[in-house]
Image (cartoon, helix red, strand yellow):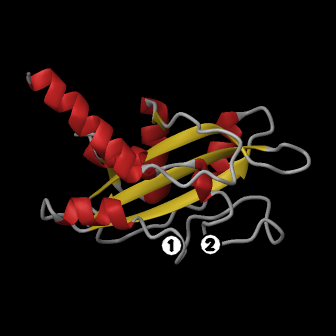
């Protein structure tokens, strides 16, 4: 019986966080960071990785391809979106509220970059713009390496979202 409740809880949480994907060609799979990516993020953000993986998992519930074009920059202005400022159209409300319910102050940032055949290169571009939060205790991120955005060229993007606990 516990298994049924756990499956139901996961289904409810996933549906609660599912994006509106009306303008996307498919729903992509969100992945956890590898150990190497965790270490790279720690160095870039100057914040310790949340080794409990709570922030990473919570980030994964928010991360989706709808973040393309909604992370503080216009695709006309830049080939990738920086993670410098939280865009008003993607405010991580559900993750922030979920964390607040557990007594945690959380903020989020997202970024994306074209995937031109190398996910690690796109990830480096995105993480190169990760913001430093002096009071942050931990960070956790998730990635979608293969978002297909409906453009005439059918461009594929890497999308990353990170949550900071401060």
Given residues 61 and 142, the one toward you in this image is: 61
Tell me the element at label 1.
loop
Q: Position of residue 105 (x, y in %)?
A: 23, 68
Where 155 falls versus 90 (above or below)? above
- Farthest residue, direction left: 1
- Farthest residue, direction right: 152
Q: Position of residue 75 (x, y in %)?
A: 78, 65
Where 72 falls versus 162 (above or below)? below
Q: Quadrant of residue 6?
A: top left
Tell me the element at label 2.
loop
User: Residue at 74% of width from left, 48% of height from top?
Assistant: 149
Residue located beneath label 1 in the image: 86
Q: Residues within 10 Å of mark 1 (few under 14, many from 20)?
A: some
Q: Quadrant of residue 74?
A: bottom right
Residue located beneath label 2 in the image: 72
Q: Position of residue 156 (x, y in %)?
A: 76, 41
Label pair 2/1, CB-CB below 8 angstroms: yes
Q: CA distance from mark 2 to mark 1?
A: 7 Å
User: Residue at 57% of width from left, 40% of height from top?
Assistant: 144
- Quadrant (top left, top right, bottom left, bottom right) of the N terminus: top left
Given residues 144 and 66, the one toward you in this image is: 66
User: Residue at 18% of width from left, 64% of height from top?
Assistant: 104
User: Residue at 30% of width from left, 45% of height from top?
Assistant: 13
């Amino acid at each position: 019986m516990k298994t049924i409740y756990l499956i139901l809880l996961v289904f409810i949480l996933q549906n609660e966080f599912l994006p509106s994907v009306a303008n996307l060609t498919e729903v992509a799979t969100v992945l956890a960071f590898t150990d190497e990516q965790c270490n790279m993020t720690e160095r870039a953000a100057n914040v310790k990785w949340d080794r409990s993986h709570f922030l990473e998992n919570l980030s994964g519930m928010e991360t989706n391809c709808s973040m393309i074009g909604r992370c503080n920059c216009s695709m006309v202005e830049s080939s990738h979106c920086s993670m410098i400022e939280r865009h008003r159209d993607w405010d991580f409300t559900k993750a922030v509220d979920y964390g607040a319910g557990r007594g945690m102050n959380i903020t989020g940032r997202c970024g994306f970059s074209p995937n031109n055949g190398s996910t690690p290169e796109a990830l480096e571009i995105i993480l190169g713009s990760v913001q430093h939060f002096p009071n942050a205790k931990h960070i956790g991120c998730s990635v979608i390496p293969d978002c297909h955005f409906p453009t005439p060229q059918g461009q594929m993007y890497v999308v990353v979202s990170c949550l900071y606990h401060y």
